[in-house]
Amino acid sequence: MSSSDDRIVEEFLIESHENLDQLDRDLVTLERDPASREVLGRVFRAIHTIKGTCGFLGFARLQSVAHAGESLLSRLRDGELALTPEMTNALLAMVDAIRIILTSIESTGGEGEGDYAAPIAALQRFSPARATPASGATPAPVPGFKKPVGKASPVAEPSPPRVTTPQAPAPRFTESQPSRLFDPLVDAGRIGRDKVDEAERLQKLGDPRRIGEILVDQGLLQPHEVLEALVVHGDAHGGGVTDGHVRVDVKLLDRLMNLVSELVLARNQILQYVGTHEFGALPATSQRLNVITSELQEGIMKTRMQPISTLWNKLPRLVRDVSTACRKDVRLEMDGKDTELDKTVLEAIRDPLMHLVRNAIDHGIEGREIRTVCGKPAEGRLLLRAYHEDAQVYIEISDDGAGIPIERIKRKALDRHLIEADRVEHMTDHDWANLIFLPGFSTAQQITNVSGRGVGMDVVKTNVEAIGGAVEVQTQPTVGTTIFLRIPLTLAIIPALIVTDGGERYAIPQANLQELVRLDTSAPAPGPSGPGAIEDVHGLPVCRLRGALLPLVPLRHALCPPDATFPRELPSERTLNLVVLQSDGRVFGLVVDEINDAEEIVVKPLVDHLKRVPGLAGATILGDGRVALILDVASIARHAGVINASGRSTSPADAASASAAECAGRRKLLLFRLNDERRVALPLERVTRLEEFASGAIERAGGREVVQYRGEILPVVRVAEMLGEAPGESDATMQIVVLPWRGRPIGLIAGRLIDIVEQIDEEQPVASRQGVAGSIVLQQRVTDVLDVDALVSNAGLEGFAPETAHAAGD
Amino acid sequence: MSELRQLCTFLLEGMLYGIEVERVQEVMSAHEITRLPARNAAVRGLLNLRGQIVPVVDLRHCLGLSARPVGVAPANVVVRSAEGAISLWVDEIGDVVEVSQDAFERPPAALNARGGELIRGAYKLEDRLLLVLDIARTLQSATV
């Protein structure tokens, strides 16, 4: 096949797949509303287009399947038959058959050897009588490629027999009738038809000029009139070119993405360099480079985003099939279809989502009779919601079914010793319900062919956690069950903590991070709370962290080959830096030389060569252009054989509540969301008030931003700007933290207040960030604790202060 | 007249080696790398090639030669492979030479020593021998 043929086939495949997805949806809609002529017409046209094109390309099997469907559809459209569920089944089977053949064409170039007699027979069963002229002989190919029929064809499609005759050419501008282009001008009386014809004749006699040029040269038309005619002409004929979308190869996007990441790094290097030298105008230029690069990066990121509807569009069909198989009535509702996710994330959650939907119908929603007895509407309701929050995507799958039978879960969990007896009394219903995510757990009394038993929910959990997400269930007897998925927006960029060990830097995904601890090994005896000295549990070094034993794993040993016996000696320094990590219910402290800083990193996959290295999830390129390895926390935990030494799982919530009780009286922090990625904290004791201002309240005075506050002029410092971070989203109102600085109030804009939390640990100092006292893990996110004095000193308020102090003094 | 081939040459312990020029993506001088935790010692680490992360394989180790003396900065020959680019550490980069198939000879049987199976043969140049590296086998041998 020539490459142009290949391209034609490829186009055909892409178009057909899109048509088929639409068909699935339309057929299900049609079943609910058989009278919709609009939907029926769309279904008919889609099949008709596929049939016509594959006839031209010589795909006989595909054509015969599509033809059988078209015959039935044409009778439905003509009102000779009424749609029954059996017909819908047959038509859906046809869609599946077409999909199989298309996949075969895509992978092998041929239609494959499949036998499609059954779906064809099923279709013909409903429309045997009418002898369509096209049914016997192979219909003649459609004479040329048409785009799939779009909005510009209000006229009903030709019925199948007419396909065999070439359609009249569309009234479009072709080589043979260039003079038609001037019809609008002729109609408007600006030029005589005879003049145009004359020019056309001249052209035919060999004049190389275009008709428009001839007419302009003859002084009959102005150039702009010709241009106008061209534009009008373009408008009149559908203007497919102006469609706002372009199909772009994902590989190209990946390459652009790569280049943009590089640009970001080059930008970072320049910024670092400029920050340490005197360069005249260069800082301003590099600042602009900074802004442009960030925007470019955001734009490129967006090209990879797709609405969740690309996934959800498959659900109406799935829900129909599953509910029919389970003999249940289910209505599917979807909210937030436009919520966008990165393509790779969408692919990763496809299977878990399908499984959850199947499960909700099979196990959640009750049968018709039971529902009626319970006083619920006979039709069950399955609601899917998706929304963005905090740079994450949340997906909820709720049903209004019977809820999860907590009692049965309790029995089963105890029967199978999935849970220790001494834990039982502390468990809430919510804890019990979430046991469904344990491997090998199933409460269904009957095994159905819809949901596989014993595997499923644990696989959902594993898959979702593999991409840094989380899953949780909430259930209420007889009211229903909701599954919550929390998914990162993108896998390409993740927040990470950079640490140094053995001279190399490593990135640790923040999703696994619990806290940072500095351990003083010389402490004489472990205190009641707070980290104590290192102890030994059967050769495993541990320390006590708030009363619980924390196994310690030195990073330099964690990446050793698996066959080597795992060395457990710890470095002999007086103080150890611990990164407390959590994976799969296991909590351990990774011992590293140095804790550097939090950074957004671009994840790059490792080549196959290195994929089998345990403990490594990938690599990334840091701001200085060097490669850093990304740690795979789960695999390190497994490799090091770390299980929580006490045998209890210390969930973050446990740890947090325990420490909250212990640490009452510790200082409190105001937690702000600076922008989508970054959180900062301010010690509460430094803050006078938190005020809300309209965004327009900011004025400029003395070269500074100020607001009027209680009769004074309050200079305002934007924290994001001072830290070189992107500003957060702007709202109609903004929160300003009022605090005293050198005896007078100033305002800080630090984004939105999200919480007030107890500071449990000392913040860890971070290198090279002015205005930040240190980093701390709060709510499993690395958070910068601001050093207000350093931050404000950098803002250059010195020159400003006396002037306003004077103004305030009046 | 038999066909001519172009080989990208480089030096290892004073010997001249070559790779088909089509397999070579680029050559570059010493480049900072990030060390990998102790694995197959032939894979020395990763380097950043304009945003692409490329593993670095030390040819001295693959071929069973002595370790590179401290202070000698290795040069990089970046080759294309099915898995993407891979950089080979060599001592020094040479010219691209054109060789005639007539001058080619299979490796002597005695060359079965360590690393010998990675040599496809030798071109007899006027003044010296040019050993041709079997890239596929070399990369295979360096697999973690």
Image: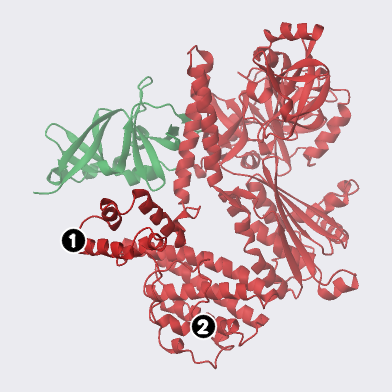
The three-letter amino acid code for the residue at tag 1 is: Gly
The three-letter amino acid code for the residue at tag 2 is: Ala
Residue B3 percent across, percent down from the top left: 14, 48
- Which residue is pictured at 60% across the width and 40% down the height? A632
Asked if A553 appears above or below A366 in the picture, the reply is above
- Which residue is pictured at 77% across the width and 8% down the height? A807
Asked if A618 appears above or below A200 in the picture, the reply is above
- Which residue lies under the disc numbered 2? A68
- Which residue lies under the disc numbered 1? A206
Q: Residues within 10 Å of mark 1 (few under 14, many from 20)?
A: few
Which chain is represented by green in the image? B
- Which residue is pictured at 51% across the width and 73% down the height? A98
Q: Residues within 10 Å of mark 2 (few under 14, many from 20)?
A: many
Q: Quadrant of residue A426?
A: top right
Q: CA distance from mark 1 to mark 2?
A: 52 Å
Identify the element where label 2 is drawn.
helix
Residue A197 percent across, percent down from the top left: 28, 65
How is the rendered protein coloured?
A: by chain
Q: Nearer the viewer, residue A662 or A475?
A: A475
Residue A761 percent across, percent down from the top left: 77, 25
Answer left or right for A425 relative to A619. Answer: right
Q: Quadrant of residue A532?
A: top right
Q: Chain of mark 1?
A: A
Marker disc for residue A62: none
Q: In this rendering, which labeled residue sits more in front, label 1 or label 2?
A: 1
- Which residue is pictured at 16% across the width and 44% down the height? B104
Which chain is represented by red in the image? A
Q: Is residue B34 visible?
A: yes
